[in-house]
Image (spheres, rainbow, N blue to C red):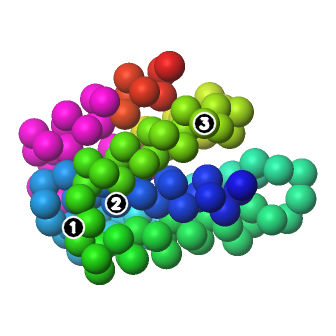
Amino acid sequence: MILEFYQNIGKLFYAIAAADKKVHPTELSKLKGLVKEKWLDVDLTENDESKDAAKHIEIVFDRLKNKALDAETCFEDFLTFKKNHPSLFTADVKMLIMKTANGIATSFSGLNKSELIMLAKLDIELKN
């Protein structure tokens, strides 16, 4: 379950980066930095399973980038997972998701329209 959580977070962050149809190296670099700085410390369970699981955010992101999958499909996959597992999405996790998504979106020449729309949808979904 924890691994699936991080895989879906990776899908979400890929969707944010790919919203404009291109994943820029600065977006990937920003993601890797934020995973290292913030996500490795997220503790979703009482055991050690989640310690290395956060690395799957990057693994999934890289895999999706190499396949050039549709951003909207990945975003919808994340939303489905969130709706099916609401207990994993604490207030702190939601805040970290938004902070990371914004960081990725603004890392390459600010926000564009596609990213802005996806971030707005994400913000609404995380408030539900």
Q: Amino acid at mark 3?
A: Asn
Magenta stretch encompasses residue 104: yes
Pinpoint residue 67: horizontal percent, then vertical percent: 28, 77
Along the line of sight, the residue nearer the viewer: 76 or 87? 76
Q: How far is the residue under mark 2 from the one under mark 3? A: 20 Å
Which numbered disc flags the more N-terminal residue, 1 or 2?
2
Identity of the residue drawn at 37% across and 43% down: 76
Confirm or deny contact between disc 2 and disc 3 (CB under 8 A).
no
Q: Earlier in the sequence, mark 2 or mark 3?
A: 2
Q: Can residue 53 be seen at all in this image of the molecule?
A: yes
Is disc 2 surrounded by few (<14), some (14 to 19) or many (20+) residues within 10 Å? many
Residue 12 spot, x, y in % from top left: 40, 51
Q: What residue sits right under mark 3 in the picture?
A: 84
Residue 67's place in the image compared with 10, above or below, is: below
Which residue type carries mark 2? Tyr
Left or right of 38 on screen, residue 73 = left
Q: Which residues are magenta?
A: 99-121
**Does 61 sit left or right of 1 as displayed?**
left
The spot of residue 75 in percent (x, y) is 35, 47
Compared across the picture, whether 76 is left or right of 54 comes to left
Is residue 101 visible to us here?
no
Identify the residue at the far top of this view: 128
Helix, strand, or loop for circle 3? helix
* Residue occupied by mark 2: 14
Image coords of residue 90 (percent x, y): 66, 32
The image's mark for residue 91 is none
The answer to the question of whether label 3 and label 1 lie on touching residues, with beta carbons closer than 8 A, is no
User: Mark 1 touching mark 2, by CB under 8 A?
Assistant: yes
Q: Which residue is mark 1?
A: 23
